Image (spheres, rainbow, N blue to C red):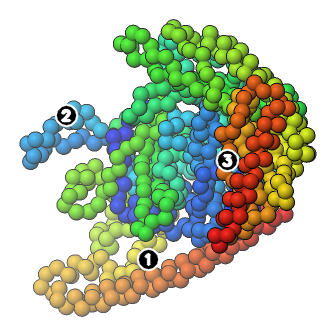
Amino acid sequence: MASGGLPPLIAAQLNYLLNHHSLDVKVEQMWSGNKCYPGVLDRFTIAIPFCLDVVKWDVMYNADSPMSAPDIIFGPEDESFHPFSAKSPKNCSLLDDWNSRDPTRLMALIQELRDRYVDYQRKRVGDVDDARLNFEISTIVFREGIEMALSSGAEKPEEVKFAVPITDMKIDRMVPGCPWRGPPKIYLQVIYPVGKKHVTAPLAPRLKLVSSSELKSFFSIEDVKLPPWSDGMCMAEYLPHLEESLEKQILEAVSLIDVRRRFIEALVPQFGWPLEADPVFCRKATFLAGSGVFTFLVHFMISTQFPKQQPALMLHSCQHLTSQGVPIKSSLMTEYPWSPRWETPQMAERICEFLADEALNFKRHCNESQLQH
Amino acid sequence: MDDLPVEKIAISGPTLASLMQRFSSSTGPIDGLLFGHVSFLTPSTLSDDSTTTSSSSSSETLIATVTSFLSSSSTSLSFYSPSGRVNPSHLAPSSSSSLLGWFSARRKSPLRPSMREFSVSESLSSLPNLSFPILNSSSSLSPCIFLLLTTPIPDQAIHTHEYRAYQFRASTESFDPKSVDIVNIGPAFRGHYGAFSPNSNFPSLACELRSSAMVEDKKEEEESSSRVKQAAEDQRHLDQCAEGFEIGRLSLMIGSEATNYTTGLEDLYEKMLAKIENLAREVELSSAKVFEQENHNRKLRQKAARYAGSE
């Protein structure tokens, strides 16, 4: 996908970067800077995750000379970021010994630049003249993986953003058969307005929990209620409470996977073996059911709030098609007799009873919609 | 080395036009060196406009004037390494004008200095043997001027050239954007010529008017016979162009007999024009050959790049 129109040497490097970087680097746009070969793309903008946001850098190769090292143009707000300045202690052999046949080079360069960018932003935040911030940094800077950034624009007030990694729970190991490559990352985003000298009471920071997307298959980070931030609090005080309560909630979510599994198993005596079921997080199961000669599928969609929230059901006819040739499905059913206090076998029984009636309605609905055309 | 702030950067219209032409005719990005001079300008306080405040007259301002450039090939990194370290051995000192800095021209890219451009500017202004004296002053300046030329990223129906000039300040490690004065000919620009000195050096031909006393030169002839040889050679070249109308005869142009000579002189001018036309044609033909060769080279490079990638 990325290689359309890119010279092969450059394409190899870009693809390696996109497929192997531990962070989700994305290409925003690609274009050509060459006059004779406008179809040969040699420039692209990449978006690199940083501090729960992205930084966008333009990578510029030269289509006339695809073996040369690329050049980078940083964002307009990073005019003072000079990673390869003569004053920086590290050398720049990465560029001087550029080997265009080595597909890992671009990734190595971007990683090196990102590391230096993290240091650069940390230094910028450290230079902010704000007593509370300086204190926060001194107590929290040792946390591994913490990132911070100073954002300032012409119109908006200066803010300091922290992305604090929360909990080192190995969630992937707690879920049997988990397909993830590593534990999902959870961050607390803390945004401090930079204090004005004359304001006496500093404003509380804005807090938000953010996680990598895979976590939502069994835990909804948006539903976590953050502990209140009291006046005069600091992050070093706040974080242990948050971590403790979050870990408790994650453990509970893990135990809920088993509750869902038992529920799916309890459906077996009623419906027979499922045709399909999500074996890891137990969020979905599909059974074959029949009412007389009318056979249909029942899809169970089980939320992370189960058993508090009842499963959503959908019926799916095996015998009726719409005019477009698509099997007829019922709408999602979430309102039917339910109590979270029932025993699991009873839940299965009650759903079975409900479906016995509903199957007739669905059959009528199917027949009617087929008669219409 | 002083890190004096330059007030503005002046460039003559033809130089900028030629730079843009060089850029727009190249297939890829180009870069190169900028030459010229830096001088103090005492602002003129004479003005017809009474509202003009004379606030700037208290101090002299420094003006960098770019008079010529040297562009390097677009495919090889020229005088610096891929990381932007300048190789001083590639920068031979030029006698007539000082090395003011460098330029970079790249199509379809943001009008901001890149990572490498920063390093090159930093490296260039930190080399002590490259600093040059400021005219009419005892201070010196390093090659700190950077001219960036780009075109907009989205395709446009109108040819657009964007450019911005900077002074690299070693003390703050940053680029200071500077205003660019394009010096053109015309009444509006008359003021600019106050500090504008021409850069095209007339070759120092060591010949003189034949009609003047040759006796006095005898002594000098003895001093250096090689100089005389050079003078004779230069004279021969001049005579070739003049075709019998040597300077001595020109004095006949003045006075009552002038009309007799005008036809002869017109004839000479016509011959000269014909020669120039011939020269122009030759240049055109050789340019076409160069262009053809460049095209061929580019195709070979593309082939090589494709082959290298498909291995």
Whether residue A308 is visible to the viewer of this picture, yes or no, is yes
Q: Is residue B290 above or below residue A6?
A: below
Q: Is residue B61 above or below residue A66?
A: above
User: Mark 2 or mark 1: which comes first in sequence?
Assistant: 2
For residue B224, the mark is: none
Q: Amino acid at mark 1?
A: Arg
Q: Are marks 3 and 2 on the same chain?
A: no
Q: Find out whether the residues at labels 2 and 1 contact each other: C-beta distance under 8 Å.
A: no
Q: Which residue is mark 2?
A: B55
Side of A205 where A42 appears, left or right: right
**Mark 2 crowd level (few <14, some 14–19, many ≥20, 10 Å Cα):** few
State the image coordinates of residue B157 (x, y, percent, origin top left).
43, 69
Q: Which residue is mark 3?
A: A332
Under circle 1, the secondary element is helix
Q: Closest to the observer: B309 or B133?
A: B309
Q: Amino acid at mark 3?
A: Leu
Chain of the residue under the numbered disc 1 shown in the image:
B
Marks 2 and 1: which is nearer the front? 2
Q: Closest to the observer: A255 or B60?
A: A255
Under circle 3, the secondary element is loop
Chain of the residue under the numbered disc 3 shown in the image:
A
Q: Amino acid at mark 2?
A: Ser
Q: Which residue is mark 1?
A: B236
**Mark 3 crowd level (few <14, some 14–19, many ≥20, 10 Å Cα):** few
Marks 3 and 2: which is nearer the front? 3
Side of A30 where A317 appears, left or right: right
Q: Which residue shows up at 48% across the image and 36% down it?
A: B174
